[in-house]
Amino acid sequence: MPRLISFSNRKGGSGKTTTTVNVSTALALKGFKILVIDTDPQAHTTLSFGITVKDINTDLSSILIDNKSPEDCTVNTFLGNLKLIPATKRLMEFERNYSKIKEARTLLSERISSIIGSYDYIILDTPPTLSLLTVSTLITVNEVYIPMQTHFLAMEGLAEMVRLIYKINRLYNPNLRLRGIIPTFYKERTRLARNIIDEIKKNLGENIIMHPIRINIALAEAPGYGQPVFQYQLKSHGAYDYYRLAEQIEKGLQ
């Protein structure tokens, strides 16, 4: 069965887009067939794969608003087995016009159902908000991972995400599971980072923490070139950390 995964956090700057781009690339490099769906109107995942608005005729909003087929809205990336359904700012129209329509929450799940069997992994990036698109994504996927900086203020965003996951699980998607917390921008030697991780383990379990992603300049530079870190600088701490994280996700291990 294909795995449907989301990297989500309602707090911006958590590294969720970087995680989406590089975990999906790592899994594709391991030979899996991957579809990435960018649900963020900012389209940072789309841009991180080097795809700009002028390259796009259709995007996720075409599926949700115009009822276009997912196949017609899928574009190629630099790897043949890594595909993308891009985002544009038109997704803001979907948010504005459909947010009060209860049935709209399941549109994403319903309209991509025809292509799920074509991939090993379908990986969704979400906006840094508790929006209709975030809720729709959590209704669609079975696994959610929360990237977060190991800062005190990030704990509030984590608590909100955990509450939302449990609510979606109860009301819409009984298969939804929180599978891991991914420490990003990680500084192993700082007392704060260790204290935050200890606090998360105390509240959510010893095995919830995934392989941490260290601060690495290559991760910051790569999106500016429209490349995942494996394409931009293969021999970097960023590439190593994301490959290790992808291995954990593949094996279902924390």
Image: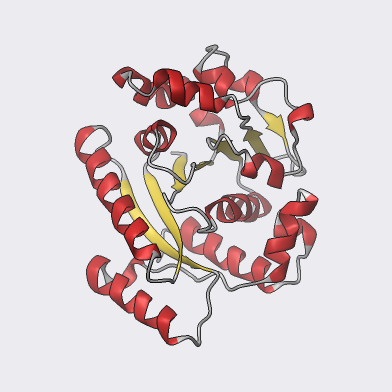
- Residue 102: image quadrant is top left
Res 113 visible: no
Res 204 visible: yes
Q: Is 103 or 101 nearer to us in this picture?
A: 101
Q: Is 89 or 162 nearer to us in this picture?
A: 89
Q: Residue 56 location in percent, x, y?
A: 73, 26
Taking the view exactly as shown, the residue that stands out farthest to the left is 170
Residue in the image at 75% along x and 37% along y: 51
Quarter of the picture containing the N terminus is: top left
Quarter of the picture containing the C terminus is: bottom left
Q: Is residue 30 above or below residue 82?
A: below
Q: Is residue 100 above or below residue 242?
A: above
Scheme of image coloration: secondary structure
Residue in the image at 24% along x and 74% along y: 202
Total marks shown come to 0
> In the picture provided, is 100 more to the left or to the right than 189?
left
Q: Is 235 or 158 nearer to us in this picture?
A: 158
Q: Is 148 or 249 nearer to us in this picture?
A: 148
Residue in the image at 53% along x and 57% along y: 13
Q: Residue 216 location in percent, x, y?
A: 66, 71
Q: Is residue 137 above or below residue 206?
A: above
Residue in the image at 61% along x and 29% along y: 89
Q: Residue 106 location in percent, x, y?
A: 36, 24
> In the picture provided, is 70 more to the left or to the right than 233?
left
